[in-house]
Image (cartoon, helix red, strand yellow):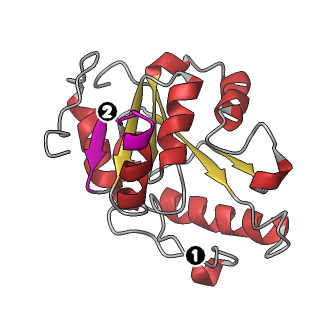
Amino acid sequence: MASDITYVFLDRDGVINKDSPDYIKKWSEFEFIPGSIEAIKLLSENDYTVIIITNQSMINRKISSSDNLEFIHEMMKKDVKNKGGEIKDIFFCPHTPEDDCECRKPKPGLIGQAQKRYDINIAKSVMIGDSAKDIECARKAGCGYAILVKTGNYKHAMDSLKEKNILPDYIAADLLDAAGWIMKGDQGPGVISNLRHL
């Protein structure tokens, strides 16, 4: 296994599938981002454990049901498995920001749930997301690395992160690029390898 990373936490919308301002309410609205299945396969084949960490406030907003969300996730996992990858587990927050819960990113509650269930060494994990909330969540949880992908809310995310003086360890074109960076295994402490243009 490359590097010291053992677990890879993935945001869902904007990382694995194309995001929508209207939410992904049913399977027919779910569209994999090109290369995302291949990325999960690459990670799985090289003994990285993939877990999804996602905010899904559409549940408490009554926009869609938990049954619909469960079906979306089962179909997503099935498609990934059919291509040779594996999603170990999915942790989601159904709450709205007004609910002030402990599990909605950028709070680290979902990663904490995963840590308890699988006895994860969080310092040997990486969080991959497309929003500022994902990177902040990674830092609060104590993840070893945080990767921002450009396939979702990249520009807004970077503006927000700069204001808070928080930076990802790597900016990836997409999930496949992020997986490649993990596979290289040459991440050093404090090394931010492609932020020279910021």
Label 2: which secondary element: loop
Q: Is residue 89 visible?
A: yes
Tell me which residue sits at (36%, 63%) in the image. 151
**Where 38 falls versus 48 (above or below)?**
below
Label 1 CA crowd tier, 10 Å (few <14, some 14–19, many 20+): few
Q: Which residue is mark 2?
A: 169
Q: Residue furthest left?
A: 196
Q: Quadrant of the N terminus?
A: top left
Q: Residues within 10 Å of mark 2 (few under 14, many from 20)?
A: many
Identify the residue under disc 1. Answer: 21
Residue type (three-letter) at the residue carrying disc 1: Pro
> Which residue is pictured at 55% across the width and 46% down the height?
133
| Element class at badge 1 | loop
Looking at marks 2 and 1 on the same chain, the residue that comes earlier in the sequence is marked by: 1
Q: Residue at x 31, y 43 (%)?
A: 179
Residue 23 % position (x, y): 64, 74
**Label 2 to label 1: alpha-carbon separation:** 27 Å
